[in-house]
Each structure stands twice: as C-alpha cells, then as structure tokens.
Image (spheres, coloured by chain):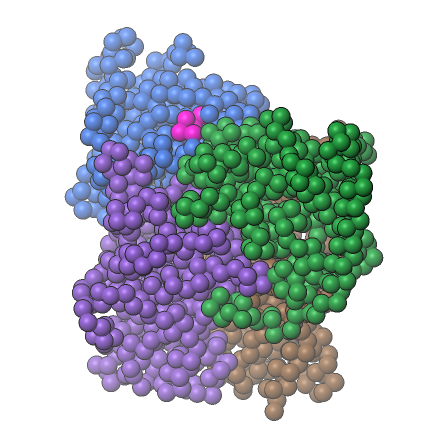
Chain colours: A green, B blue, C purple, D brown
Amino acid sequence: MTCLRPSRDQLVWMYDRMTLIREFEERLKWLVETGVPVGAVHYYTGQEACAVGVCAALEPTDWIASTHRGHGHCIAKGVEVHRMMAELYGKVTGTNRGKGGSMHITDVSVGMLGVNPIVGMGVTHAVGAALSAKVRHTSQVAVAFFGEGAASFGAVHEAMNLAAIWKLPVVFVCENNRYSQSTPVEYAVADPEIANRAAAYRMPGLTADGQDVIAVWATATAAVHRARSGGGPSLIECKTYRYYGHHQGDDTRRYRAKEEEEAARARDCIKRFREQVLKDGSLRQEELDAIDKKNKEKLDLAVIFAEQSPLPDPAELYTDVYVTEGR
Amino acid sequence: MTCLRPSRDQLVWMYDRMTLIREFEERLKWLVETGVPVGAVHYYTGQEACAVGVCAALEPTDWIASTHRGHGHCIAKGVEVHRMMAELYGKVTGTNRGKGGSMHITDVSVGMLGVNPIVGMGVTHAVGAALSAKVRHTSQVAVAFFGEGAASFGAVHEAMNLAAIWKLPVVFVCENNRYSQSTPVEYAVADPEIANRAAAYRMPGLTADGQDVIAVWATATAAVHRARSGGGPSLIECKTYRYYGHHQGDDTRRYRAKEEEEAARARDCIKRFREQVLKDGSLRQEELDAIDKKNKEKLDLAVIFAEQSPLPDPAELYTDVYVTEGR
Amino acid sequence: MKAADIAAVHELTFNQAINEALRQEMRRDPTIVIMGEDIAGGAGLAHLGFVDSWGGSLRTTKGLITEFGPERVLDTPISEMGFVGAAVGAAMSGLRPIVEIMFVDLIGCCYDQIINQAAKMHYMMGGQVNLPLVIRTAYGTRGDGKRTYGGGAGAQHSQTLYSVLAHIPGLKVVVPSTAYNAKGLTISAIRDDGPVVILEHKFLGSAAKGPVPEDAYCVPIGRAEIVRPGSDVTLCAIGRMTHVCLEAATTLAAQDIEAEVVDVLTLSPLDETTILESVSRTRRLIVVDEDTPTASMARDIAARVAEKAFDDLDAPIKTINAPDTPVPFAAVLEAYYVPRPAQVISAVLEMFD
Amino acid sequence: MKAADIAAVHELTFNQAINEALRQEMRRDPTIVIMGEDIAGGAGLAHLGFVDSWGGSLRTTKGLITEFGPERVLDTPISEMGFVGAAVGAAMSGLRPIVEIMFVDLIGCCYDQIINQAAKMHYMMGGQVNLPLVIRTAYGTRGDGKRTYGGGAGAQHSQTLYSVLAHIPGLKVVVPSTAYNAKGLTISAIRDDGPVVILEHKFLGSAAKGPVPEDAYCVPIGRAEIVRPGSDVTLCAIGRMTHVCLEAATTLAAQDIEAEVVDVLTLSPLDETTILESVSRTRRLIVVDEDTPTASMARDIAARVAEKAFDDLDAPIKTINAPDTPVPFAAVLEAYYVPRPAQVISAVLEMFD
Ligand SMILES: Cc1ncc(C[n+]2csc(CCOP(=O)(O)OP(=O)(O)O)c2C)c(N)n1
Ligand SMILES: Cc1ncc(C[n+]2csc(CCOP(=O)(O)OP(=O)(O)O)c2C)c(N)n1
Ligand SMILES: [Mg+2]
Ligand SMILES: [Mg+2]
C-alpha cells in the first residue's frame, strides 16, 4: 500500500498542515502559560500526522466529525486558524461566534461537523453524515475521528454496527495515543489492538503508524476509496502519542514514564517527514523553512486578530436558542 | 465437550424445568386468549433448552439477570410458578407484590436479579453481580441472558469490555432466536454469528445448539467453571427460535415463513429430549409422563392461587418508593 | 371548528392522522427520512415478500416503506444512542430525519443525543447549523384497568416524562391531544428547522378519533388552545389530560360551574399569554398533568402564573399530577395512578366553598 | 454552629470534606466500593510505580486507592451506561457502590440506569431489594470570567441539570453547599439503603472552605436549613446559590431589609415544612436556582408554596434561574448566565416598592 506515493503538492500540503497545527498548539500553549483565558483546551501536539494524513485523502466536500482534542482535525480540514483563535478568545469573529469554545469548534462550510467533547458522539454524527450522502446520492465520505478511550463507549459500537449494516461511506479513524486521561489502553480496552475490533462488524481493520503522515495517508486513501465506491465502512487505527497532558492542567509525569515520552518524541511526525523528504529529495530545505515561516506568521496574525476582534454583544446570550429565531 | 454427560438427576431436572416452562407459557397463552388481563407478556416457548441448560450448570447461590422474555429464565432458576402467575394477575402474593408484572419478575432469594425490559440493562447488572462476587471473595457466578437484538446495543458492548478487563465471573448467554421483534438478525447485526463477537474482548466465544438442552448445559458448564475458577468471562451463543409472536399480540406470519417456523418446531427441544433419553434408556416413559402430569397440576394450582389471592391494597401505590420507608 | 375551514375532511384516529402527516410531508420533500425500530418491520426480508410487517409498534408508520422504499424508511437495530446520533448527523448534513423512539421510557438510552447534541447544536455552533430533526415517541399510562395501549405495561413502559425534555433549552416539545392537532403539529415539527420532540399518548393513538382535513396543514408550535370557554375556573391540561378536563368540565357545568379548558399543546416554548389571559378572566387555575409532580410542567405553569398573575388570583393555584411514584403494574393500582375527572372536579369544588 | 457540637474540627475545602467522608466510610464498611473514570488514575500502571495519578478529575477521590487498593477503588473505561449499570447490579447483590459521573452533563450517557433502573428497582420489585447506591457528580457554571472549575467549559461541560434527576420518583437528590454539609450529606447518602445522587458544584469544590468535624457525622437527607434568619423575605436557595443569597442578604440588611436564607440541601424529597414555615413568617418568597427555568426546582418550589401557603403571601413569588439557553462559552456571556446577588437584590427591592 505504501507503494502509493503522494504528489509533490500533496507533500507540501501535508507539511504545511502539520506545521500549522504544531504552531497553533505551541502558540496556544504559550498563551495559556502566560495566563490568557482561553478556556479548557486539549492539545493535539504529537498526533499531527493522523489528522493531516487522513484529511489529505479527502475532498473538500467530504465531512469529518471530531473529538475534544479537535484543533488538529479542524486545521487539517481547512478551518481558518484566526477564526479558531478568535473562538478560544470568546470573540464574535470566532468560528462559533464565541459561543462554543475549543470543545465545540465547528465550520460546516469546510465539512467540519464539530469538535465534540462528549466522547463517542461525533462518531455517531459522522455515520449520520454518511447516511445523508448515501440517501442524497452524493459521493461524499464522512470520517469519524475518535480516541482509543472512546472505543469502550457503547455509542461507538452502535455506530460501527449501523455503518456496517447500511454499508455507509464512512471511515472510522481511531487515534490510539494509548491514554484516556491517565488510564492506559492496556487497562481499559480488552483488546488494545483497536483495529481488531473491525472484525466484529465484518469491516476492514487497518493499522497505520500514526507518526508517519504518508503511511496514514496511504491507508486512509484506500479506506476512503472503498467508502466512496460503495464498499462500505472501514476502521483505521493510528498508533500515536500526545506530547502534553490530557488538558492544559494535566501533568503527564503522574502516569507516563520519561523514557516512554522521549521514545515517542524521537519518532516525531514532523521531524521524520522533514528528514525523509529531504533525503529522497522530494522537497527542498528552503521550501520547508518558508512554510515554517509562513505558518508562524499566520499564528502571529491569528493572535492579533483574536485580540482585536470585538466581544459578543451580551444580547447574544439569548440568540440562536431556536433555529427559527434566526439572527 | 458433549462427551460430558449429565447425571440421571440432572436429566430429570432438565425435563422437569423445560416442561414446567412450556406448561407455564401454554397456560398463560390460553389465559390471554380467554381474556384474562395479565398485561404485556413475551412467551419463551421454544427456547426452553437455553434457560434450562444454562441454569443446570449453576449453583442456587449464583445469579442470573434476564430480559423481557424472562419467564423461562425465572422458572429455570427456581422462581415459583404460582408466585409468578400471581404477579401477572397483579396480586399481592406475586413475586413483586403485583407492582412489577411480567416484565419485572424478580426473586433475589433464588438469585434471579430481575426480568428487565430495557434491552441490554440486565447484562450490565449481571456484570455488577459478578463484580460483587469478586470483591466479596465469594465463588458466585453471574449469568447475563440477552437476545441477539440486544447485541447491537451499546451497553452490552460496555458490559462485555468491563467484564473482560476486570476478569469477572460472568457468562454472557445470547439467545439468538433470529428476530428482534420483526427485524431479522441478518439485517440488524453486522456479524450475525454473535459468538464471533467474543474475540473483540479476548474472551472465549462458544456456540451451542439452543434446541439441545444437553449441549447447552455442557457448553455452559465449561464457561461457568472457567468463571468460577477465576478465568474470567465467556460468551455463549445459543441458536434458538421463538415459536410465538414477539408479544401476545404479534402475528409472526407477517415476517416469518411457514416453512421456517415448521422447521424450527421440528427440532423442538422437549420432543428431542424425550426421544433421546428414551432411546438411550436414561429415563423411562412413565417418569416423563409423571413429570408432565405434575407440572400440569402445578399450573392448575398456580392459576387457582393467582385467582384467589388478594389484590394489593390501594395504599401500596405509595409504599416502597424509598427504601428507607420500608414496609 | 377549525377543520371546517378546509375543504375535504375525513375521520381518522390520532395514529392515522400522524401517518397521513408523515406520508404527505415525505411526498413533498425527498430529504425527509424516517428511522426507528420496526417502523417498517421485516427489514431485509423483502426477498421473501416480507416488508412493512409492523409499521411501527403502534402502526403509525404503516405503509411508508412500500411508498418510499427502504432508503428513506429505515428499520434500525436496538441502538437508540446510535441511530438518534445518526439522525443528528444527518440533520446537520442535508437530510430532515424523523426518528421514532418506541417509548419515551427509552429516552434514557439516547438522552445525551437529545439534550446535549440536538438541543444545543444551533446555539453552541453560533447559529451556523440548522437541525431539522423530529423525534416521535409514545408516552402515557392507560389507567382504566385494560391492559393494552399503555395499560399493564409496568414501571418502565408507561411513563410520561416530558418534563425532562421540556427542561432543556433549545428543544421544542409538543403534546398533541386530538387527531386534528396531531396531524397539524407533526407537519409543523417536520417543517421546523430545529429539533422538535412529539409525545404521542399510547391510549389516544387508537382512542382519539376525529375529523381531519385531507390536505396538509400546520398547527402552530408554541400556541395553546382554549378548547372550552368558561368563566369560573381555568383547567390547564396537557395531552390526554385535556380529555380528562373536558369530561370534568361537563360535569361541573351541570353544577353551574363553567370551567375553561386550555389545551397547552406545546410545552416548550410555552404559550404563557393564552394561559395568563385565561386566568385573568377566570381568576382560578388548576393545572392537570399526567407526569409525576416534582419539577413537572404542572408546577412550572403554576409558578409562572404565581409570578405573573398573582393579583388576578382569587384562590390558590392547584396542580394535579400522577403520584410521585413509579407506575405500578397491578390494574387496581394503575387505576389510581392516572389523574381522573373526579380529582379535577373535587379540586374545583374545593375552590368554591 | 453545628460543627461545634463535635470535639475535633479542622478546616477543609468542600472536596477535601467529601474525600474524608468517602475514606471514613470505606474504613467502616468493606462492602463499599468506588468506581469512575480516573478516580484513581494510572490504573494498571502500578508496576511502573504509577497509581492514584489523578484521584478524580476534581481530586475528591485522591488517596483512596493507596489505602483501599484497586479492588475497591476501580478506574473505569469510558462506559457510563456500563459501569453505572454494574454499580446497580452490585448494589443488588451485596456491595454498596459509589460511582462518580465526572460531570452531570454526562448523565445523558447513563440516564436509563439512573431513572429506570436505580430509581425504580425497590418499588417495582415489591420492596424485595435495597439499592444502596451513591452517584456523585460535579455540576455548575463558574460565571466570574475565570476559566477553570466550571468556567469556560462551554455548553456540554457546565450544566446544572439536577431538575431532571429530582423529577424521578424513588431517587434522592442532594446538593451540598459547604464543606460541612458536603461531608455530612455524603455520609448520609452512603448509609442510605436506596439510591442517592449528590451534586457537587465544581467551583465550590475548591472555593468553599470551612470547619469540618474530624469524626464521621450525618447531615440528614430531606431537611432544609435556615442559614440566615430574617423577617422580611425568604430567599430559598439551592447549592451554590446559597452563597449568592447570603451575599445579597448582607447588602439588603444595610437597607434594613432582613432576608431569611433557606438552603434547600435536598431537592428530593423536598423539605416543604421548613420552606412553608419560613414563608408564613416572611410572607414573601424568592427561589434562586442555578438550573435553567423550565420545569425547574425553582418553579417546583414556587408552585408548592403557591398551592399550600397562598394566603400567607403578600407578594407574587419570584424565581431566579439561569436563562433558558445553553451555557455560552465566552466569558462575557457566561458572566450573565449564572444568577448573581445583584439580581436577587433588585428582585427583593421590587417587592418592597
Ligand atoms: C461520555 C464521556 N465520558 C467521559 C468524558 C470525560 N473525558 C473527556 S476526554 C476523556 C478521555 C478520552 O480519551 P480518548 O478517547 O483516548 O481521547 P484522547 O483524550 O486520548 O485524545 C474523558 C474520559 C467525556 N467527555 N465524555
Ligand atoms: C433499549 C430498548 N430499545 C427498544 C426496546 C423495545 N423492544 C423490546 S424487546 C425488543 C426486541 C428484542 O430482541 P432480542 O434482544 O433479540 O430479544 P427477543 O425478543 O428475541 O427475545 C425491542 C426492540 C426496549 N425494550 N429497550
Ligand atoms: Mg487516547
Ligand atoms: Mg431475538
């Protein structure tokens, strides 16, 4: 499968998105640590190759549904970082007009159906989007991102069964970063190899190195093609790792060994990608540095945009409770 | 495994319970058809070998949790038929003082934790009873009966995962009668071979002919032994069939073919048992007839008991809302 | 009589009226799909000639699959959290799903999808998504000793529970009481761009028969209806309790007490105006609600009136609910469970001595 | 001051007080087990020297696993329906489980176990089973602009929701407001033979500090407390709102209005007597509730008083709730969401002109 090679443009896009996600989270972390009140956030840092590899296999009209750890998924699907940052600042220019926050960032205009902090719920919504595509006879595909902790949740089981019996165009992407808060997968999931779970639904279960964006992309491409061509759902398990705590306040050293964390960082998806594309000459040093620079600037502007944007009018507390009210 | 042979007493017990269940349901059906207001009932007829085969492998102190189709499980575990009948009549002498009805028959004194008509919930309760046995260091085992329709329900997935990671002494018994109301298993469950599901939890998945009480007993004996000796949970799928409608008002010919129903009845668990034990000479005709007679009489008495028992005092509407009130 | 405004009218039961609403709307809009357990029945058995074997456990969806096919009429496995979630996702992405939760007693199996997902999406996403979702569910206890249509179903299959739905901001909750408003409210719910829950009383489903316009029409969500004018006391009723209050009002009339009966119809958003306006004329209020009392809609309505029309009142506001207990099985106990005309009558008479 | 009755007293936060209650009861009774997500943390990593890494997401269960071991302190996977169900089954079969649902916002994932199973078992089984189950869960919105402990958590992690629990017959629902009553109510809940839900306000958890007797003691379930006597108006408050009302009362006192503050403490069964008795003296009532208004406990209490003490009232009963909207994220909006002393004060002042 990894004989499948991404085009040069795709490689550039992958690097651009991975570094944009990395930069977004690093900047956010810095803001949090300097006391900017952005609310509860869950850093995606370390898992960039998962979101980017999968979204590289999607069309703009395809859908994704995300989890509480959703910044990476949003950016990979094309949500603008300045509107995300404004959302975290609770500004009216945010993706959700400041009414959602990190745990609800949504931009349906780019097929991002929502960050969703009730574990497992996004998975059911992706199945619904896939049903919509099937009933409306479009060729859209829906991707459900979830963590390995969510794999123990009943709704995820129900969603996979529904997708399988209805042969829906959905790809289930489990980012197995080995921890659900402080609880390790070996403890919480009877079979920690999440991909094996697919057999129970008679769907393909694929495993990808979540630190290798090209491997993720190749695996996702196959699953997406299967879904789009009427072959039904697949489950992809991406073996990955989150660098920071569960949320901004969490100290990982209470439950993860230094060695384990260092080993994971040694396989950093961005570092490895750089080495590889430079080695095989598919991209040049200057190109990569230019992307780094551009994304740093993007975040500079995003923060300025967020800071300078207006707060919502207090009256917004009462708007959009019912759809019919409109605005 | 079927080299394992039940003792003569066990054979007698199996026949006694299967025919008692059959007689209970046939009598109930007659009562319903003559207009006795017993409330919503789900006949167990046809599946007798499942409940009896499993309970034959249990100790009196073991627990079972049941489903809406629970009369058979109750009788197999030792709930008295006259108190069950009185419950259906809404009499104060009923198992639940007339406050529960068919869908809530419970008798904890014999380890029957309750008929439970919210699909899948009983399965989670059995897991809790198994946890209780483990924490209190008793040697009790819990059995969770459920239908193949319940296999699609999230709580059942969660319960199996919990039992597996905690290595609890529980046996999951799926009675696959091929229909969930009018919906066939081939439509509703991605993998209609429910036993395969066990692999997802790294537990043994066993299949038994649910029309053969000895086969069910042998399979259950192995799973119960594993559970009692600390080996953790197992899943048993019993291939079976319900003779009548989903509930008393359901006409099966709207969704089941005559041929299919006749083929199932041809493998009737009681008929086959009789033939087999008579053929191999393990039980005598007179013994069997005597048991039939005794159970018919038991039901005569049960109905009289139910009819003659007093109704609950209207004040009972307000009692036992809170435990602390007591009675 | 409203139905008279419209040309052709036929007699339908409450359930038949809902069936007609679903059918007419599905004809109008191909993006409407309907899902639930056995809403067709025999799914996957078409090759054996079995399809539409059930038409829903109360037959309200009978015949839809034969007209609209299995792609728009989906039998589901027992997966309330999953298929209600699928409906939420579908509503965000171009469909207008109608889901049937067999009984309101089962909302505990998909409550998060209703209260955290469907109800909040539009608000927490800053208005960028609509959520045209209809949730239909059967509720209620029969209470007359008969053991069908809500009778003899016990503690987990006889509940009313709508107050735990009405409590949630963002959700519209309607409770029809006649074949006429059942059809009209169902059509309004389907055409609403946000989530609407419709509670259908099991007993009314077959018992409430009445004239229904053949064409599609809307009964507006958010409006209560004065179904019997009266000057002496306002009986504010929800769902089936409207019939209980009308019965009581007839008896009271013989004793020269003219009760005005207000059928709430929509629990959320509540039509306070109609209720307050009625109380300002009658100066007395009794709210009758089949749900259990604590944090109920009966007490909600009583509290609103106690705050906004206190000075109009000549007597304490009374509420009549089911007792604060689970639903008992025995017919003799169930008979005391559901609020009865006799209770309404004596509550009114107490007000007048 | 009650705490004074008992010998040794120490200063604890609300969460520390709950932790002490859990610890002391687990020492007393070996059948008590506690389960929830990351209530210990690092489960299964003991061999690496990691255990009790979290002690619950709000640290209320910190240290319990090191004292009582992994058999009685169980980290669970994300399976609310499953592990609450396991707790129900365990409570039927010899254990006294305490489960933590991380946030009340998550009850939608296990609502059936709470309302159909735990709450009804004893009744529908004819009294044959007890169900000694405690469900602990964190609730509430912070509202002061800070983004921790209930601040900045958004629509699905900031709710109050207790009215949808109090609505259910058979369930006891308590809402402590201080370190003292948090410990006492937790111990009472653990010793109760039926299901009790304890709602712990995220913000109070760390902010409410106070003297707590070192020994175990019970604060009775089902009793409200007059925390500030007054003659002019009764402020009936739930949970954190008690502090909001006390603050308002202090300001009002400066204007010669003596407000009596009643801390409800138990939502179900409600202590009507204490509330009615207070209103009969003050002749005015304002109920303050952090939950959204429709079918809320605020309106429940108002309705009970409107029915039972109507003639005692000199003014309309007022209720103050969160607005009928989801919880918004932006600090500027969240600040207007939670009921504030200013609202209570102006509501009282309106009553006096
Ligand atoms: C239904 C539900 N239960 C519990 C929580 C609290 N919670 C939030 S994130 C989380 C861990 C999720 O782990 P995983 O699915 O592996 O995702 P990860 O955080 O590793 O990305 C938990 C338990 C929740 N939000 N929803
Ligand atoms: C959670 C839930 N959803 C739906 C129902 C309605 N219902 C009752 S029994 C049943 C079918 C159960 O099928 P299965 O598990 O195969 O058991 P069987 O009836 O075949 O014994 C359904 C859908 C319910 N009681 N609970
Ligand atoms: Mg994880
Ligand atoms: Mg079945």
Looking at the image, in which quadrant does ligand 2 appear?
top left
Res B157 seen here: no
Horizontal relation, residue B266 to residue B133: left or right:
left
Horizontal relation, residue B79 to residue C250: left or right:
right
Give the x, y percent position of residue A231. Answer: 45, 33
**Residue shown at 38%/25% (left/top)?**
B238
Horizontal relation, residue B164 to residue B71: left or right:
right
Give the x, y percent position of residue B14. Answer: 33, 21
Quadrant housing the N terminus of chain D = bottom right
Res A296 seen here: yes
Q: Main secondary structure of the magenta part?
A: loop
Residue B268, above or below D210 = above
**Residue shown at 46%/51% (left/top)?**
C90
Q: Residue furthest left?
A: B34
Q: Which residues are magenta?
A: B191-195
**Residue shown at 49%/45% (left/top)?**
A140
Q: Residue furthest bottom?
A: D353
Give the x, y percent position of residue D271. Answer: 55, 67
**Residue shown at 41%/17% (left/top)?**
B218
